[in-house]
Image: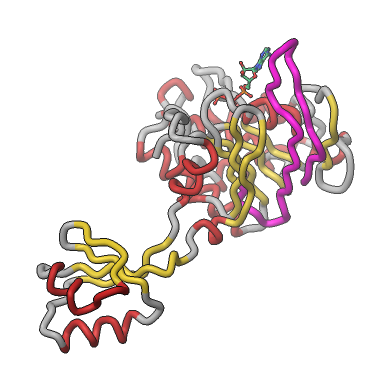
Amino acid sequence: MRTHALCKRYGRVHAVTDLDLEVREGDRFGLLGPNGSGKTTTVRMLLGLVLPTSGEVELLDGPVRKQALARIGALVEGPAFYGHLSGRANLRLFDAAGPGGPGRTRRRRIGEALEQVGLSGVDRRPVKAYSLGMRQRLGLAGALLRRPLLLVLDEPTNGLDPQGIREVRELLLQLNREGTTVLLSSHLLSEVEALCTRIAVMDRGRMVLQDDLAAFREPTGLIEVRTPLPQRAASVLGASVAAVDGEVVSVRSGDPAALNAALVEAGVPVVGLAQQRRSLEAAVLAVTGEGSDVLRR
Ligand code: ATP
């Protein structure tokens, strides 16, 4: 799925400007950005719910087309359910709204979707007795009915407690392992970091960063040594020391084993030693500015 120079204007508000997004098959793609940065508008354009002002969306194999949309599962707003009905009954209504073959096929499809989200055991309970996490999983079951190749989710863990967040995360990981490409938007760095393989960051309607998560985690070339004798370590290591912060000495070195041996030989006890890696947070803050206080861990 890609977009080319995608733009959306609402009167004088430039909600999305010149967006070139590239989501590859098998990705777990995180669209990250503070509130109001244009994520929801982007997701809506991808799904054909909002018409772009200009630019293009290429879905699975070409511009937005009915067939392509049929292979995309979406969870855009908090899904609406009938509270007095069971999860299965809600899915039955949901499924009946789409194309879908004879009753037996529909029943099997619904059963499989409930199974996939781990709700097949509780589906006699009315939805009003579900936790938020269970509701969100039921929403996902709805999105899974069409066996999507691509799942598009807008803030899928919004409003969930840590347990619900973990449930949704594990489910998405599992679906991705089974071959579904996942695109989700979030304003939570930690969520995207825990789940995604590839990331785009939006800021005021523009994409300011797009890369593999691994690229944000590259070693910085510094090794952090933890020792109760930081000053002694610093004098042993001399010019290669980049910084001393409490018990942690940052050293410019590419060889942790040699560094450890040199310190131990000089009688400096080493409690911990780790290669420093870039953090996603630092990379995001560098491009969105410290003012993006709504981008939270
Ligand atoms: P949030 O996390 O708050 O949903 P977002 O990153 O999804 O934020 P959007 O909802 O896409 O951002 O909004 C981007 C900008 O477009 C905002 O300035 C918003 O006020 C504006 N906007 C969105 N929808 C409309 C609309 N229907 N009419 C007018 N302006 C809109």
Question: Which residues, given as a range, are shown in magenta?
Answer: 1-29
The image quadrant of residue 179 is bottom right
Q: Is residue 216 left or right of residue 59?
A: left
Q: In this view, does 172 lie to the left or right of 104?
A: left
Q: Which of 12 and 100 is in front in this view?
A: 12
Q: Where is residue 56 in the image (x, y as percent from the top left)?
A: 85, 35
286 in the magenta segment: no
- Where does residue 117 sit, x and y in percent of width and height? 53, 44
The quarter of the picture where residue 243 lies is bottom left
Q: Where is residue 122 in the image (x, y as percent from the top left)?
A: 45, 37
Q: Which image quadrant is residue 76 in?
A: top right
* Ligand 1: quadrant of the figure: top right
67 above or below 246?
above
- Residue 237 vertical placement versus 75 (above, below): below
Residue for point 64% across, 48% down: 210
| Residue 168 can be seen, yes or no | no
